Amino acid sequence: MKNKLTKEEVLHVADLARIKVTEEEIEKYQVELKKLLDDVEKVNDVVGYDDEILIAPWDHNADLRNDTDTRMLEAKEVLKNAPNHTGNYITVPVVIGESEGA
């Protein structure tokens, strides 16, 4: 098993990442990237790895409440708490286009 990547492999990774690398960086990354890839490969060696665990580590399904009909608030009740309103609509301050950059 080799202990470093080839120059072409490092240049390919650099191209994918859209970064420029110097000759010194290529030499450094040949070893560093190989170590990183070896560490990532260790995941395959984990004993007892199970895809089902990744879906949900518990057996409980979400308990949802039942939908029930309730009384809807009347417009007059809602507007009592609104400081400004016009007709049946609550008036709010304009926030779009107020910044200096807009």
Image (spheres, rainbow, N blue to C red):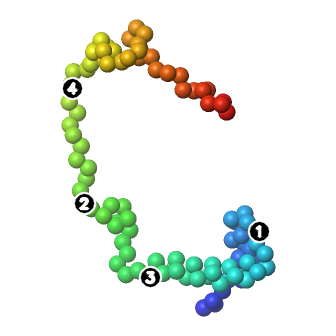
Q: Residue at x 72, y 63 (%)?
A: 18
Q: Nearer the viewer, mark 1 or mark 4?
A: 1
Q: Position of residue 80 (x, y in %)?
A: 30, 15
Where 1 sits versus 69, above or below? Answer: below
Residue 5 x %, y %: 67, 83
**Residue shown at 38%/65% (left/top)?**
54
Spatial separation of the CA atoms under disc 1 and disc 2: 49 Å
State which quadrant residue 10 falls in.
Answer: bottom right
Q: Residues within 10 Å of mark 2 (few under 14, many from 20)?
A: few
Q: Position of residue 2 (x, y in %)?
A: 63, 90
Cα distance, mark 1 to mark 3?
34 Å
Mark before the other along the chain sequence, 4 or 2: 2
Q: CA distance from mark 4 to mark 2?
A: 31 Å
Mark 4–mark 3 Cα distance, whole angstroms, equals 54 Å
| Mark number displayed over residue 59 | 2
> Would residue 47 appear left or right of 13 to someone viewing this image?
left
Label 3 is placed on what type of residue? Answer: Asp
Q: Amino acid at mark 2?
A: Asp
The residue closer to the viewer here, 26 or 87, is 87
97 and 70: which one is in front?
A: 97
Q: Earlier in the sequence, mark 4 or mark 3?
A: 3
Tell me if label 1 and label 4 are in contact, CB under 8 Å.
no
Graded by Cα atoms within 10 Å as few (under 14), some (14 to 19) or many (20 or more), the crowding at tag 1 reads few
Amino acid type at mark 4: Asp
| Viewer-proximal residue among 46 and 80 | 80
Please, is residue 64 above or below residue 93 in the view? Answer: below
Q: Which residue is mark 1?
A: 20
Q: Which residue is mark 4?
A: 69
Q: Which element is circle 1 on?
A: loop
